[in-house]
């Protein structure tokens, strides 16, 4: 089994609606996202998936979030854009991306909202 890991970042504002504290107020983070993919089969070049294609896929997904008020995005009108929900959102978008699908599987997405606080999303096999 092979595993690849990449990181990228984006800046965005959000609020956790009905949170009993400061997070109920509009505030922003410089989010850091780590994505890990895995698989058994390497291509003719000996790669699971080209890092360049993997990074491009994550960058495209994060561009949809970057410099936005996350609560106003369609994906988060019904649920809070918490770190947990953001990790799940990015995971599902990445697993369906044309650069990933049929090449490897997403193992997990981890997102830090501060350097000391992160949420990780994965699905059981």
Image (cartoon, grey):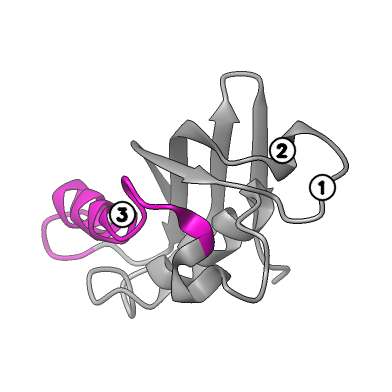
Q: Earlier in the sequence, mark 3 or mark 2?
A: 2
Of residue 19 and residue 61, the one placed in the foreground of this image is 19
- Evaluate if marks 2 and 1 touch, with contact meaning CB atoms under 8 Å apart: yes
Residue 22 % position (x, y): 75, 32
Left or right for 63, reference 111? left
Badge 1: how crowded within 10 Å, few (<14), some, or many (20+)? few
Q: In which quarter of the image is residue 65?
A: bottom left
Badge 3: how crowded within 10 Å, few (<14), some, or many (20+)? many
Q: Which of marks 1 and 3 is nearer the N terminus?
A: 1
Q: In this view, does 74 lie above or below 16?
A: below
Instruction: Evaluate whether residue 23 shows in this view.
Output: yes
SS at mark 2 in the image: helix
Tell me the distance, in whole angstroms, between the alpha carbons under discs 3 and 2. 27 Å
From the image, tell me which residue sits under label 3: 58
Residue 64 % position (x, y): 30, 61
Q: Is residue 100 above or below residue 115?
A: below
Badge 2: how crowded within 10 Å, few (<14), some, or many (20+)? some
Left or right for 84, reference 72? right
From the image, tell me which residue sits under label 2: 23
In front: mark 1 or mark 3?
Answer: 1
Tell me the residue at 52%/65% (across/down). Answer: 89
Q: What stretch is highlighted in magenta?
A: 43-71
Judge whether residue 110 is colored magenta.
no
Q: In which quarter of the image is residue 119?
A: top right
SS at mark 1 in the image: loop
From the image, tell me which residue sits under label 1: 19
Instruction: Evaluate whether residue 106 shows in this view.
Output: no
Of residue 49 and residue 98, the one placed in the foreground of this image is 98
Judge whether residue 45 is colored magenta.
yes
Q: Is residue 70 above or below residue 5?
A: below
Q: Which quadrant of the rendered structure holds the C terminus?
A: bottom right
Tell me the residue at 47%/43% (across/down). Answer: 13
């Amino acid at each position: 089994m092979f595993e690849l890991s990449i990181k990228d970042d984006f800046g965005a504002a959000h609020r956790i609606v009905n949170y009993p504290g400061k997070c109920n107020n509009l505030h922003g983070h410089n989010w850091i996202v780590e994505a890990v993919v895995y698989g058994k089969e390497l291509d003719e070049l000996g790669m699971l998936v080209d890092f360049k294609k993997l990074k491009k896929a994550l960058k495209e997904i994060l561009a949809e979030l970057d410099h936005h008020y996350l609560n106003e995005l369609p994906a988060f009108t019904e649920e809070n854009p918490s770190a947990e929900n953001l990790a799940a959102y990015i995971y599902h978008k990445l697993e369906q991306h044309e650069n990933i699908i049929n090449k490897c599987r997403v193992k997990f997405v981890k997102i830090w909202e501060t350097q000391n606080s992160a949420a990780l999303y994965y699905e059981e096999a």
